[in-house]
Image (cartoon, grey):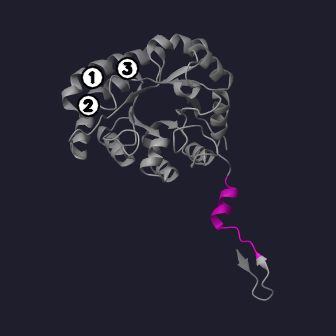
Amino acid sequence: MGYDNERMTRRTFLPLSAVALAQTPAPVAKFKQSVCRSVFGRGMELDAACQMAARLGIQGFDLMRPPDWPTLKKHGLVPSMIPSASGIRDGINQLDLHDKLEAGLRETILQAAEYGAPNVILLSGERKGLSDEQGLENTVKFCNKLKAMAEDKGVTLALELLNSKVNHPGYQCDSTKWGVEVCKRVGSPRVKLLYDIYHMQIMEGDVIRTIRANHQWIAHYHTAGIPGRHELNDQQELYYPAVARAIAETGFTGYIAHEYSPLGDPETGLKQAIAALKF
């Protein structure tokens, strides 16, 4: 706010940054919205969940295994992020698990390619005494074993960023910096990150700036309300339309998947989540 020196009348000045923003054409969101099973609450059959998702304009379904893919296909939904053999506790940062996990991931990559699924999830695992550097080296070593196959099959391996502060104590891939360093060292267009907005808001905050600075390493996004991991409504701390706009400005064309647990009616919550990614 400013004041006229003579009459002391109050005047409003629009910041230059706001002027520039107002003159910038709004980006066209080319990304697709997806869901995880949790958004439908407990007890809803998969067929009914798929029917609701498709009716509301959802295009993908995350973390569904091959036996469920025909149900997704019946409703025009893509298995947008496929679960893999790696786990939150026992993951690809553990050298003694590499042979077992590699065999499972190779089979998953083949299944994904055959079905036209774009992404397979990777999980670092817990630290279990590993330093960040040693865990990083082990994770890179594992990704290097699979990157050629992923490139050949056109499937992206997406290492998920999770918080170790609230939900997953000990998880090693708990910062964007660490995850990006894995991607840089592997150096493959088919090894990227699953940027979970909920988890990274807890660990780092500064979500929009981080996305803008590191978008080239991100293959997929997850959403949820913070705190509590519930609906994307006015009871949580992030303004998702601004986050969605920032993602659209990067030119992202992949999937943004909702992964929250509803406190209220599942359909109402999903409508809110879909609307929250419009700006």
Q: CA distance from mark 3 to mark 1?
A: 10 Å
Q: Position of residue 222 (x, y in %)?
A: 50, 36
> Over which residues does the magenta segment extend?
11-24
Count of residue discs: 3
Q: CA distance from mark 3 to mark 2?
A: 14 Å
Residue denoted by label 1 = 102
In the picture, measured across the screen, residue 21 lies left or right of residue 184, that is right
Kind of residue at disc 3: Ile
Q: Secondary structure at mark 3?
A: helix
Residue at image location 36% in from the left, 43% down from the top: 164
Residue denoted by label 3 = 109
Which mark, by number, is residue 111? none
Kind of residue at disc 1: Glu
What is the quadrant of residue 112 in the picture?
top left
Residue denoted by label 2 = 142
Q: Position of residue 74 (x, y in %)?
A: 59, 11
Name the image quarter holding the N terminus: bottom right
Q: Residues within 10 Å of mark 3 (few under 14, many from 20)?
A: many
Name the image quarter holding the C terminus: top right
- Give whichever of discs 3 and 2 has the lower sequence position: 3
- Determine contact: label 1, label 2, CB under 8 Å: yes
Q: Secondary structure at mark 1?
A: helix
Q: In the image, is residue 29 part of the stretch drawn in magenta? A: no
Q: Position of residue 118 (x, y in %)?
A: 47, 25
205 w.r.t. 190: above or below: below
Q: CA distance from mark 1 to mark 2?
A: 8 Å
